[in-house]
Image: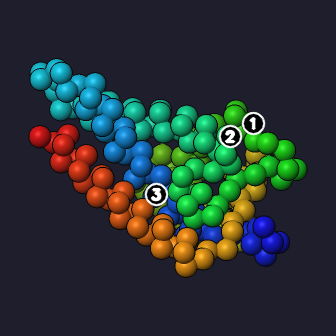
Amino acid sequence: MEEAERSGKVPFRRWFARFFDIFLYLPASNLIVYLIYSGTNNAPINRLKIAGIVAIFLVWPLFESLLIWKFGSTFGKYLLGIKVIRKNGEKIKYSTSVVRVFAVMLFGYGLWIPGLSLFTLLYSLVAIKRKESYWDKILDLQVVSEKMTAKRFGIAAVIFALEIFLLARVAAITNQ
């Protein structure tokens, strides 16, 4: 990667990478919950919703941590040419990856609590545009990005459209 391409100052690309990942995790977690509860016709809908939320907030961080630890990237980050590395060049430890994912949920998304989330998203946007995110700074990590080519953009657009279609199909199946 050329030095000019190593900048992690690509906040909107990072944001879209997160959406790619969310659109993968949502159908997967909903499908898992549906398969677990599909045999029990008397499962209240509230229990299904709670199980889905638990699946997202517990399974997602552990799975994302595993991907970042093993590959330095999630599917969305890989698709958009983004990678998380240690500043000293060493491999990211799994524990560091777990802390990073939970720090992103807390400081980057404010645990999706209305109001707090808006504040943390704006703060993160400003921090990333200036230099680096708070969580990467305290964990001594660096986000690097490759140049966004037309081919990469096209592939990402097609996959994103497929993800939306998949999400709609899973929602239709689980709402029957």
Most distant residue in the bottom direction? 150
Q: Give yes or no for contact between labels 3 and 2 (Cβ–Cβ under 8 Å).
A: no
- Percent across and percent down for residue 106 are 55, 46
Q: Earlier in the sequence, mark 3 or mark 1?
A: 3
The Cα atoms of the two marked residues, 3 and 2, are separated by 19 Å
Task: Name the residue at 30% across, 37% down.
Answer: 31
Quadrant of the rendered structure where residue 82 is?
Answer: bottom right
Q: Is residue 44 left or right of residue 115?
A: left
Task: Name the residue at 56% across, 42% down.
Answer: 64
Label 1 sits on a secondary structure element that is loop
Tag of residue 20: 3
Q: Which residue is mark 2?
A: 69
- Percent across and percent down for residue 76 are 53, 56
What quarter of the picture does the N terminus occupy? bottom right
Closer to us: 88 or 164:
164
Q: Tag 1: residue type?
A: Lys
Note whether 28 is above or below 73 in the view shown.
Answer: above
Label 2 sits on a secondary structure element that is helix
Q: Residues within 10 Å of mark 2 (few under 14, many from 20)?
A: many
Q: Earlier in the sequence, mark 2 or mark 1?
A: 2
Q: Which residue is mark 1?
A: 93
Q: Give yes or no for contact between labels 2 and 1 (Cβ–Cβ under 8 Å).
A: yes
